[in-house]
Image (cartoon, helix red, strand yellow):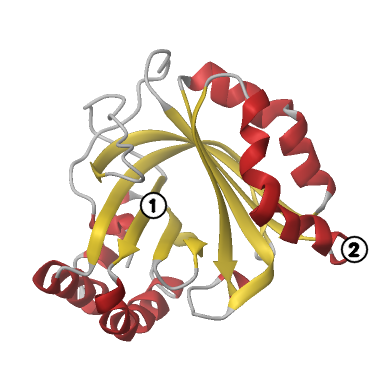
């Protein structure tokens, strides 16, 4: 299930100086740097102390080949952060030593700043205020994050594969990857779309719609966040595709 289920249509202020701005880094760790990659999950959370303007920080794993299944990837991972404003986010992405370490150890590296377009729910208590309310044109990104209730995990994972298979082949989907804080129960999906119509077409049809209805009907989640963003400054390589 993806953040394409989020509702509301808002677009970014070109100068969002006083609103939180998120960043996402996706990497495929190089063969010779796997020990460093594994260490991120143990000590990575302590890296946050030297990052100016940071208010939220999550080191994330990924599924096999950057997918959505239960089998973890030994090399693909992500870093999701939220900053006080766009200036702090840009400073981090453009040259913070932590970002440089990710670049140095990565076979593939992708980064993007995310200006909130709509947000429903929360992630570890954090919700993101939209930057503005004017109509959106152009690319859009989506993030879903959910804490799955242990008693509902089997039912969730029965629904997830068909929705995620549809996502991989959806018209207008430029990037899709599975992410997670912990196996099985704390999962996220990030996707990048050519436009909001493409996202809505996927979100409101087929297996994804069935999965969303089941999640609401059966109460799969103890906490969830469905957010849409305008991607700003995206660049790099992920799953063999060049961005920016």
- Residue farthest right in this picture: 32
Q: Quadrant of residue 197?
A: bottom left
| Total numbered badges shown on the rendered structure | 2
Residue 146 percent location from the top left of the image: 33, 59
Residue 145 percent location from the top left of the image: 36, 55
Which of the two discs, 2 and 1, sits closer to the camera? 2
Residue 129, placed above or below residue 23: above
119 sits left or right of 113 in the view: left
N-term-proximal mark, 2 vs 1? 2
Q: Is 138 or 209 nearer to us in this picture? A: 209
Residue name at image x 69 percent, y 27 percent? 94
Residue name at image x 21 percent, y 27 percent? 133
Residue name at image x 53 percent, y 19 percent? 53
Residue name at image x 39 percent, y 52 percent? 143
Label number found at residue 187:
none
Q: How far is the residue under mark 2 from the one under mark 1?
A: 30 Å
- Helix, strand or loop at label 2? It is helix
Label number found at residue 32:
2
Label number found at residue 143:
1
Residue 204, placed above or below residue 3: below
- Helix, strand or loop at label 1? It is strand
Q: Quadrant of the N terminus?
A: bottom left
Q: Is residue 236 visible?
A: no
161 sits left or right of 118 in the view: right
């Amino acid at each position: 299930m993806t953040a394409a289920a989020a509702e509301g249509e808002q677009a970014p202020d070109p100068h969002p100086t006083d609103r939180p701005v998120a960043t996402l880094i996706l990497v495929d760790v190089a063969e010779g740097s796997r020990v460093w990659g594994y260490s991120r999950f143990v000590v990575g959370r302590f890296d946050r102390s030297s990052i100016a303007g940071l208010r939220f920080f999550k080191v994330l794993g990924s599924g096999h080949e950057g997918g959505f299944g239960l089998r973890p990837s030994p090399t693909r991972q992500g870093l999701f952060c939220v900053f006080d404003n766009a200036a702090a986010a840009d400073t981090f992405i453009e040259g913070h030593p932590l970002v440089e370490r990710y670049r140095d150890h990565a076979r593939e590296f992708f980064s993007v700043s995310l200006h909130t377009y709509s947000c429903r729910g929360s992630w570890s208590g954090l919700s993101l205020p939209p930057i503005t309310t004017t109509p959106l044109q152009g690319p859009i990104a989506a993030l879903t994050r959910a804490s799955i209730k242990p008693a509902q995990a089997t039912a969730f994972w029965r629904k997830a594969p068909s929705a995620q298979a549809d996502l991989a082949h959806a018209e207008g989907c430029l990037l899709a990857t599975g992410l997670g804080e912990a196996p099985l129960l704390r999962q996220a999906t990030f996707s990048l779309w050519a436009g909001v119509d493409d996202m809505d077409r996927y979100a409101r049809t087929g297996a994804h719609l069935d999965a969303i209805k089941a999640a609401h009907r059966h109460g799969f989640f103890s906490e969830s966040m469905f957010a849409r963003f305008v991607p700003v400054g995206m660049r790099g390589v992920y799953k063999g595709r060049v961005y920016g």
